[in-house]
């Protein structure tokens, strides 16, 4: 109890631990990341990436990823828990991976991902020099995407109190609930929402620094993030 264990590579044996299978006889929390990651690999500048892993029992076979505000593109990494996992992205990309393997691709648009077996998906922001919208703004971060079964209808969150001044939230919400969602008890401009599919709409909403609440009648997905000159942060709500 109250102890931690860290598994890491070394300068002489660099590796990627994605796909490691961890089991225990008692409940544990697992965090994974990288001290200084260049994303994509040949783009400056690097930054640390980190997030808490979701137990396999809570993985899903349906996810949505929307682009990040003021960024030109992003990376998705999709990890399989079982063999012969078939992945479909926007009805155009189909690939099969096995347990412990991952499929990675760069996206410039919203991604609707489905699979025949449960998967885990990470969304990565890119380095500050990989951008056609605001050059030098942002840096890598990693966020484990929430699936629909992890959505809730009431969140409390805070922005990072630092030099990061460009803060945003990404929303994935049922189309029938757009007029019900409230950020700090105020309606969100419906013009910020865009169509994803027959069920969901998405939005990239600028927010002020500080503490916030957001709630609606139906459950929805939330990611909180921010950018500044060669700096960033990002995490899920809830």
Image (cartoon, rainbow, N blue to C red):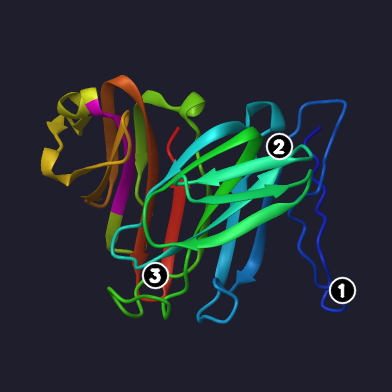
User: Residue at the spot x=38%, y=53% of the render?
Assistant: 225
Residue 13 - label: 1
Residue in front for this viewpoint, 97 or 26 = 97
Number of residues whose C-alpha sits closer than 10 Å to that of mark 1, classed few (under 14), some (14–19) or many (20 or more): few
Q: CA distance from mark 2 to mark 3?
A: 29 Å
Residue 209 percent across, percent down from the top left? 26, 52
Left or right of 134 on screen, residue 125: right
For disc 2, the marked residue is 29
**Main SS of residues in magenta:** strand
Say if the magenta span includes residue 174. Answer: yes
Vertical placement of 212 versus 71: above or below? above
Q: Nearer the viewer, mark 2 or mark 3?
A: 3
Task: Identify the residue at image location x=70%, y=32%.
Answer: 56
- Is 92 included in the stretch rendered in magenta? no
Q: CA distance from mark 1 to mark 2?
A: 26 Å
Q: Is residue 201 left or right of residue 126?
A: left
SS category of the residue bearing label 1: loop
Question: Where is residue 88, by image quadrant?
Answer: top right
Q: Please tell me how crowded label 3 is: few (under 14), some (14-19), or many (20+) other residues with Cα within 10 Å.
A: many
191 with respect to 85 (left or right): left
Q: Quadrant of residue 128?
A: bottom left
Task: Tell me, for residue 138, which label it has, or none.
Answer: 3
What segment is highlighted magenta in the picture? 168-175
Residue 34: percent from left, percent from top:
66, 63
Q: The residue tagged with tag 3: helix, strand or loop?
A: loop
Number of labelled discs? 3
Q: Are marks 1 and 2 in contact (CB under 8 Å)?
A: no
């Amino acid at each position: 109890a109250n102890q931690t264990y860290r598994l890491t590579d070394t300068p002489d044996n660099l590796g990627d631990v994605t796909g490691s299978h961890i089991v225990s006889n008692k409940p544990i929390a697992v965090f994974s990341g990288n001290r200084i990651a260049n994303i994509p690999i040949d783009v400056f500048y690097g930054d640390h990436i980190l997030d808490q892993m979701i137990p396999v029992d809570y993985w899903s076979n349906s996810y949505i990823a929307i682009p990040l505000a003021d960024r030109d593109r992003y990376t998705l990494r999709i990890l399989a828990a079982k063999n012969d996992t078939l992945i479909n992205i926007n009805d155009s990309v189909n690939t099969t991976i096995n347990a412990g393997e991952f499929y990675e691709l760069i996206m410039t648009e919203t991604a609707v991902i489905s699979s025949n077996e449960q998967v885990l998906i990470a969304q990565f922001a890119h380095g500050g020099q990989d951008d056609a919208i605001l050059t030098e703004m942002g840096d890598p971060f990693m966020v484990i995407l929430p699936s629909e079964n992890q959505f809730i209808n009431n969140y409390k969150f805070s922005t990072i109190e630092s030099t990061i001044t460009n803060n945003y939230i990404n929303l994935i919400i049922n189309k029938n609930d757009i007029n019900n969602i409230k950020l700090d008890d105020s309606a969100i401009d419906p013009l910020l929402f865009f169509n994803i599919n027959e069920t969901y709409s998405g939005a990239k909403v600028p927010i002020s620094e500080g503490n916030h609440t957001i709630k609606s009648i139906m459950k929805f997905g939330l990611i909180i993030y921010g950018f500044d000159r060669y700096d960033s942060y990002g995490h899920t709500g809830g």
